[in-house]
Image (cartoon, rainbow, N blue to C red):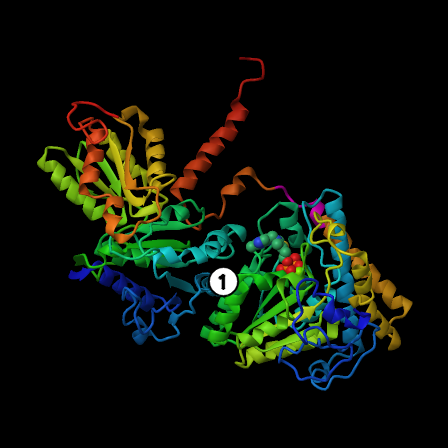
Amino acid sequence: MTQDHALQGSEFHGGPRVPGAGTASGTVLPGPAHDGADEPVQLIDRHGVRHAHEHYDGLVADVDGAELRKLYEDMVVVRRIDAEATALQRQGELALWPPLLGQEAAQIGSGRALREDDFVFSSYRENAVAYCRGVDLTDLLRVWRGNASSGWDPYTINMATPQVIIGAQTLHATGYAMGILQDGDDAVAVTYFGDGATSQGDVNEAMVFAASYQAPVVFFCQNNHWAISEPVGLQAHVPIARRAPGFGIPSVRVDGNDVLACLAVTREALARARSGGGPTFIEAVTYRMGPHTTADDPKRYRDANELEDWASRDPLARLATLLDSLGLLDADYTDAVKATADAIAADLRQGCLSMPEPEPTDVFKHVYSAPNSWLDRQQDHYERYLASFEQAPQEGSR
Amino acid sequence: MTTMTFGRAITAGLRRAMEDDPKVILMGEDIGKLGGVFRITDGLQKDFGAHRVLDSPLAESGILGTAVGMAYRGYRPVVEIQFDGFIYPAFDQIVCQVAKLHYRTQGAVKMPITIRVPFGGGIGSPEHHSESPEAYFTHTSGLRVVSVSDPQDAYTMIQQAIASDDPVLYFEPKRRYHVKGEVDEASDRSASDMGTARVVARGTDVTLVTYGPLVPTARDAAVAASDEGTSIEVIDLRSLAPIDYATVEASVRKTGRLVITHEAAQSGGLGAEIAASITERCFDVLEHAPVRVTGFDIPYPYSKLEFHHLPDLDRILDGVDRVMRRHNSLSGLTREGVSQ
Ligand SMILES: Cc1ncc(C[n+]2csc(CCOP(=O)(O)OP(=O)(O)O)c2C)c(N)n1
Ligand SMILES: [Mg+2]
């Protein structure tokens, strides 16, 4: 398999290949869009060269040098947040962290396409999307420090808190979109999930429901090539984007390491949903450069060469090269971006370390919205039990 | 007061809830034009529109999962599961999402979803159409579980379930859909309280606790026993999670004896939970260990044998004989005063 084929082919690790699947060359075809075409939409190639695209250029015509810089800054910041959180985990301050390293473009490109009243239902890895939604940094860590079962109130940033049950959130987004339809509103529900998730019944059911009701929902699949240790080829024998048309849902494959292309395809999907065109499925072809979580050891199951290959397609590096070629990457600018990212990381750390400890009886809170006789009795007994330590005789006095 | 069947009373309650709150949406398989396989949603799509009575694609996890999304958006979905045995594909969404989202989000997201489940046996159906899965759900924190047995309760409790900000599983004993009773349609929805148990027959010797399909059977048992001079107090729990133990305890403190009967399998079932809880609370007054009269620990049997599995009047009275320390099937019917 040549390097040029890798974006297509490297995911097909297991099983026979369907003729025609993953055989496209690295050249960017002009379209057609939304037919589940195998060749990912790409506007900025791995070398940082901007290519014209007959269909998608129009969708990002407003993205000038200043806007490109903002996207770059976002990606630097979220990579820095990710690194800081990983460090906090290594230092014992977080129980676990799911890194997004390598997926910055997919998340920032799509996340920055959203409107404030759109609603996101994601998995656990979309910390950069949460950043785009304006999440409070400390809130991002509460769950992973074990201090709360959710970091934030979903309605404050119009994003549900991380979903751990693989694929379940795609149905929630679809139902939410059905509610948008009932309300006659033009907001859109956007759901994020992984390549592994596409095997789940819920994801497939979500596509059935979304198509049935023509719900304004965008399915954003980050194909990062791995579901813990299982390669995408084990989940899918044809490019994942090809499945959606079978449900009656237009789909598009996009270079998930190209922030501009991700922005363009997401904008198009959102516009379709807002104007009554129903759901769209986006497969962002990207790569999980880190472990599945901080508890994982990818050395046990994947080849270092693969990582190296994908490192050469790094989403930040290619945008930096493009900015440089446009004369927009002077040292003052990069220093300023780095300083911003470091300051945010320092805030993140500070927020983590100063998080208040929960109270023991918080465990009983919010199980129900109304008093519950079973639980009230258990809480009462437990409070009396805890109080008994205060009244307990000194050791040895018995 | 209107005389109506138990099934019609649920329909009337659904209609009232939909009139009262435009956010109430019905979702399920075949609930539109057909009115559901038991006709409980009959006429509602015609009157409220296809946007409020949704014929769902045939996928239970999909139905519950999209109901969760609708609830996020501020709706009050009422989901119909076609038959008890078809709830399992939705189990994950019910247990991991519906039940936990309020807790997970520290109260920010409410899940006012009502899940209607026609349940229980006795209708001569093939496999998967006669199950009693309530204990799976009573064991799941975050859910409320109720079962109805009488038309007035059906009418008010469906409205209370829908009005509840917590998710409610509403178990409808399908073999009782045709039972008739009086319903006061003018009553407000506080006419009966779905959180409290109801004493349906007064008695002094034995407390007989049940719910759903066996309430009429338990009542008949009480009548039969009184002919033999035994006074049975029958309690219809209505709420299965949480159980109104105050009512059960008050009764057992009077009778000193407890029999629990349900169609569901015995081990790990509600009867075990009730027996344990009442023993903890009333050990000092118990004259005999609580006795369970339940379905066997078997997959629901084929219909020719289902009435061996389902507790009936005689099996209930045999349980009553046990707590009364009279001769019974286990002691041997000829020996006096033996308890097993
Ligand atoms: C229903 C369910 N099964 C298994 C798991 C354990 N698990 C957590 S993440 C994961 C892999 C998911 O892979 P993918 O969908 O590709 O998302 P990614 O982690 O790559 O972002 C698995 C198996 C789970 N969380 N939920
Ligand atoms: Mg993956």
Which residue does the numbered mark 1 point to in the structure image? Answer: B72
Count the labels in the image.
Answer: 1
Whether residue B170 is visible to the viewer of this picture, yes or no, is yes
> As drawn, which residue projects farthest toward the left?
B227
Residue A82 falls within the magenta-colored stretch? no
On screen, residue B307 versus residue B226, left or right, reads right
> As drawn, which residue projects farthest toward the right?
A331
Work out which quarter of the rendered image holds the N terminus of chain A and state it: bottom right
For label 1, the SS is: helix
Q: Quadrant of ligand 1?
A: bottom right
Q: Chain of mark 1?
A: B
Magenta stretch, residue numbers: A351-357
* Residue for point 76% across, 80% down: A28
On screen, residue A315 versus residue B61, left or right, reads right
At which x and y percent is residue A243?
A: 58, 72
Q: Quadrant of residue B262?
A: top left
At which x and y percent is residue B54?
A: 39, 71
Residue type of the residue flagged with mark 1: Tyr
